[in-house]
């Protein structure tokens, strides 16, 4: 890569240094913790979208449903 870019060799050296400092076991724990955090974030976003969809469906539903009652104008017209 050009100036300012990081090549694959530089990334491998950084990875080797991190492994030497933290060790493989701790490095694995960090990875699993990061994975569970991402999974929790995705689950919470999914729940939020689900609740928003439910609210949208409720608000887009019928405004009101009226049943005819005895003596209503509609019933009076039908009897004539």
Image: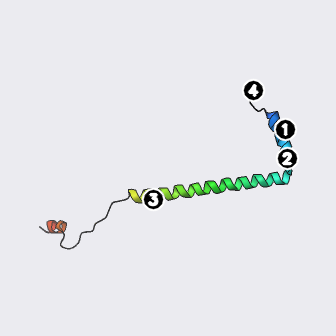
Quick one: which residue is furthest to the bottom in this view?
Answer: 70
Residue 55, numbered circle: 3
Nearer the observer, disc 4 or disc 2? 4
Q: Which residue is mark 2?
A: 19
Spatial separation of the CA atoms under disc 3 and disc 1: 51 Å
Residue at (56%, 58%) from the top-left corner?
47
Instruction: State the quadrant of the N terminus.
Output: top right
Spatial separation of the CA atoms under disc 4 and disc 2: 26 Å
Q: Is mark 1 in CB contact (under 8 Å) with mark 4?
A: no
Dot placed on the residue nearer the N-terminal end, 3 or 1: 1
- Please tell me whether mark 4 sits on a helix, a strand or a loop: loop
Dot placed on the residue nearer the N-terminal end, 1 or 4: 4
35 is higher (above) or lower (below) than 3: below
x, y percent for residue 31: 76, 52
- Please tell me whether mark 2 sits on a helix, a strand or a loop: helix
Quick one: which residue is furthest to the right in this view?
Answer: 20
Spatial separation of the CA atoms under disc 1 and disc 4: 18 Å
Nearer the observer, disc 3 or disc 4? 4
Q: Which residue is mark 1?
A: 13
Spatial separation of the CA atoms under disc 3 and disc 4: 52 Å
Residue at (45%, 59%) from the top-left corner?
55
Dot placed on the residue nearer the N-terminal end, 4 or 2: 4
x, y percent for residue 69: 23, 72
Spatial separation of the CA atoms under disc 2 and disc 3: 48 Å
Q: Is mark 3 in CB contact (under 8 Å) with mark 4?
A: no
Q: Which residue is mark 4?
A: 3
Nearer the observer, disc 2 or disc 3? 2
Residue at (14%, 65%) from the top-left corner?
77
Dot placed on the residue nearer the N-terminal end, 3 or 4: 4
């Amino acid at each position: 890569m050009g100036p300012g870019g990081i090549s694959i060799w530089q990334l491998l050296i950084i990875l080797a240094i991190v492994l030497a400092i933290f060790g493989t076991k701790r490095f694995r724990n960090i990875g699993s913790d990061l994975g569970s955090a991402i999974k929790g974030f995705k689950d919470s976003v999914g729940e939020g979208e689900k609740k928003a969809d439910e609210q949208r469906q409720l608000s887009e539903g019928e405004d009101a449903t009226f049943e005819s009652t005895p003596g209503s104008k509609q019933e009076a017209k039908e009897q004539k």
